[in-house]
Image (spheres, helix red, strand yellow):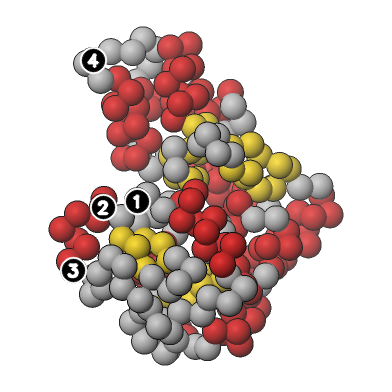
Amino acid sequence: MLTYSEAIEKVMIDNGGFASLQFIYKNIEKYREKTGLTPDDTIAGEVQMKDIFTRISKGVWGLTDFIDKVENENLGNFILQEDKKAVFKSNNPTEKTIVSKTRIGQDKFKKALIEDVGKVCPITNIDNTRLLIAGHIKPWSHSSNEEKLNPKNGILLSPLFDKLFDMRVGLITFTPDKKIRLSKKLEENANRIGVFDGQIINNLKINGREDFLQYHEKFIFQG
């Protein structure tokens, strides 16, 4: 019998390289019997713990190799739906080439972002650009080609907070009124990162980013 991880991988392959947890719960028995008292909890644990899986959004996971290709080769973008489902919209060859070049030239996006928000992390006040990461608020793999290049879809953070904000983690987010929200999943680590839930981040540049931040809170942040 296949392991849970092997069965989950096959379900994702059948679905194009990704799947919601609900889809996996319903379809995994094509490849292995559900066993144990709480098999769905076991499945959720497997996708969170195994490196072959990458989080896409709340309740949606993909094969890491597939997500890497989506991001590095600009294969297309995920479109999230209200019921924690996702569809994938493929790019045509011309779109792949144009935006893939931009992905390679990430420094241009960072430069445009710095011109817009200044060269400082709004949380830590670190102002050495070599120590700051230019990330997308609406993740690159979720964004349209226009959104991928839009500096208003960018946020400049120091590495720890960039990691916490990233779609693969989703343990912090920001509201349009400049408040930082901390996920309950941070547990005791919430007391170790130097900010508190609901703290106003005065230096955070919001103008033009409201819709992107609302998207992140709705689909990425773990709450």
Horizontal side, residue 78 vs residue 12: left or right: right
For disc 1, the marked residue is 223
User: In x, y percent, where is residue 146?
Assistant: 73, 63
What is the C-alpha distance between the residues marked 3 and 2? Answer: 13 Å
Residue 142, x across and y down, in percent = 61, 51
Query: Which comes before the other along the chain, label 1 or label 2?
Result: 2
Q: Residues within 10 Å of mark 4 (few under 14, many from 20)?
A: few
- The residue positioned 43% from the left and 84% from the top of the image is 203
Q: How many other residues sit within 10 Å of disc 1, few (<14), some (14-19) or many (≥20)?
A: some
Name which of mark 4 and mark 3 comes first in the sequence.
4
Q: N-terminal of the two: label 3 or label 1?
A: 3
Q: CA distance from mark 4 to mark 3?
A: 36 Å
In the rendered image, residue 76, in percent from the top left (x then y), is placed at 69, 48
Q: Nearer the viewer, mark 4 or mark 2?
A: 2
Does 188 appear above or below 158?
Answer: above
Task: Give, as a three-letter code, the residue at label 1.
Answer: Gly
Q: Are marks 1 and 2 in contact (CB under 8 Å)?
A: yes
Q: Which residue is mark 2?
A: 184
Say the numbered circle drawn on residue 40. Answer: none
Question: In terms of sequence position, does the residue under pointer 3 or pointer 2 come before the other?
Answer: 2
Quadrant where the N terminus lies? Answer: top left
Within 10 Å of disc 3 (Cα), the crowding (few <14, some 14-19, many 20+) is: few
Residue type highlighted by circle 2: Lys
The residue nearer to you, when weighing 119 against 203, is 203
